[in-house]
Image: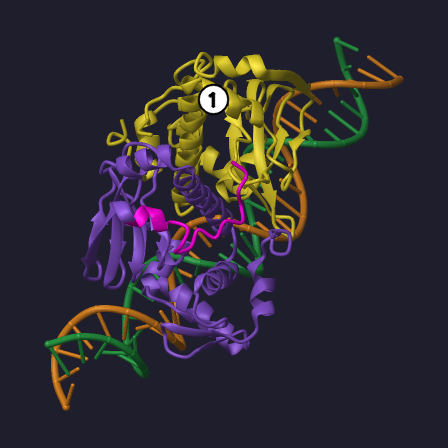
Chain colours: A yellow, B purple, C orange, D green
Amino acid sequence: LRLRNDRTGPTATAQLDFIGTVMRYPPNVEVYGEGEPTDYFYKVLSGAVRTSKFLHDGRRQIGGFYLRDELFGLDFGDQHPFSAETITETKVLVIKRSSAISLSARNPEVAHQLFAMTARELQRMQDHVVLLIKSAQERVATFLLEMADRNPTQEEVIELPMLRQDIADYLGLTVETISRTLSMLEASGAIKLATSRRIVLRDRSALVQLNGSEDHESRH
Amino acid sequence: LRLRNDRTGPTATAQLDFIGTVMRYPPNVEVYGEGEPTDYFYKVLSGAVRTSKFLHDGRRQIGGFYLRDELFGLDFGDQHPFSAETITETKVLVIKRSSAISLSARNPEVAHQLFAMTARELQRMQDHVVLLIKSAQERVATFLLEMADRNPTQEEVIELPMLRQDIADYLGLTVETISRTLSMLEASGAIKLATSRRIVLRDRSALVQLNGSEDHESRH
DNA sequence: CGATAATTTGATTTTTCTCAAGACGCGTGG
DNA sequence: CCACGCGTCTTGAGAAAAATCAAATTATCG
């Protein structure tokens, strides 16, 4: 236990790569369904994935987005609580859970990695709960900062792989509200909408201000 | 892995009891603070506990409620992401994490229990995320069903240990909305407010209807 | 029994959703 | 290369949900 600052980047899960199979999916395709057995988990090699869950009336909650080098489907329990779909064309590494477990029994490093990823997942989920009590502005600001921190490209340029509807369902808002809020943030000078999918952070401190969370300096 | 239907009730964590210390707290007292090291976790012996987190402007999110025989503070990472406070007068078993870990190394049953509790925690968190996109009626209905399922006393009588404000901060609503929604549910005949803290479920199917979640039959 | 906190109820405002229309972007076929 | 069509995104106007502000009622505790 006791690990928070693990980067768990490409090298961190490298040993898992040997027991995985590479698969390629077109956009908007299901990788696994809600309720399916958790026999496998996955690592995004390229592209992007979302996990989602539907209520009876069609409302959709997106549990999270997964970008390059991130693991998804690493669920406790015997069934996946969310389904997972590709957002763009995506290459994933499919890893047999039982293989990873037996590997981790022999290799403490792998066990450590799996634990770290699970911890991050729980952390992410907790942050998501806190996010969902915020105002629309705060949710969008938080989302942008989150994406900026994860995007390994440039510091202040976010390349969004997902549609507005995905963002809306992740933040518990409507597409219209997402759109309006982004326009408002642009008008206020906090961001620049280069294209609808490419967002430049112009004033990060303004976003941090809006984000509303207690913990930003206090976290590291 | 692969365990969903564990009850993890009193007997399930019995072996942990030997390495714990019993503590008694008055109501509304902090058991641990946000950001404190995760050296201990806890089991509620009697009373009730909430975990919470504050945003900078004072808004509070309650992560969860913990009733008799439930474990809390079992967090990944080196710091507790939420603080924990008693709701009523509460007796808790304080368990040293390192002791539990070394015990679980020798005793697979204990390892299994810790894993199961962590899995439940993640499950609960996921359900909480889904809850927070629902309407006020749906959130309250979901909350009541959740409490009814956890209350070991009578089938249809809920004894709420927490204030309306706690419920509000758990559901991401205001006290007024909680109160109004409960009144409305009473007017519709779904529940009866015996006292403000004692609620009788009169028409559980009406609540299940309102609850809105996909998974109710599909879960077992 | 009285004081204080908690809960309920009411009136109004704010926020976000819904419904609707227009603008934009991109790929395909002419 | 351009035009069309379709999906996506943005913007606007009105409606709905929940928050806020305020007051009245009820519960709790000494």
Q: Evaluate whether residue A158 shows in this view.
A: no
Q: Position of residue A195 (x, y in %)?
A: 54, 22
Magenta run includes residue B9: yes
| Direction from residue A105 to residue B205 in the image, left or right | right
Residue at the location (33% across, 30% down)? A1
| Direction from residue B194 to residue B79 in the image, left or right | left
- Position above or below: B220 against A68: below
Q: Nearer the viewer, residue A26 or B7?
A: B7
Residue at the location (58% across, 63% down)? B208
Q: Position of residue B169 (x, y in %)?
A: 35, 55
- Position above or below: C11 against A200: below
Around disc 1, counting alpha carbons within 10 Å, would you say few (fewer than 14), some (14 to 19), or many (20 or more)? some
Q: Position of residue A53 (x, y in %)?
A: 59, 43
Q: Name the outermost residue toward the front.
A: B106
The boundaries of the magenta stretch are B1-17
Rendered image quadrant of residue A132: top left
Residue at the location (45% across, 61% down)? B150
| Direction from residue B202 to residue A23 in the image, left or right | right
**Dot 1 corresponds to which residue?**
A104
| Labels in figure, total | 1
Rendered image quadrant of residue A189: top left
Q: Chain of mark 1?
A: A
Rendered image quadrant of residue A211: top left
Amino acid at dot 1: Ser
Q: Evaluate whether residue B169 shows in this view.
A: yes
Residue at the location (47% across, 33% down)? A182
Q: Nearer the viewer, residue A164 or A107?
A: A107
Magenta run includes residue A110: no
Q: Position of residue A4 (x, y in %)?
A: 33, 27
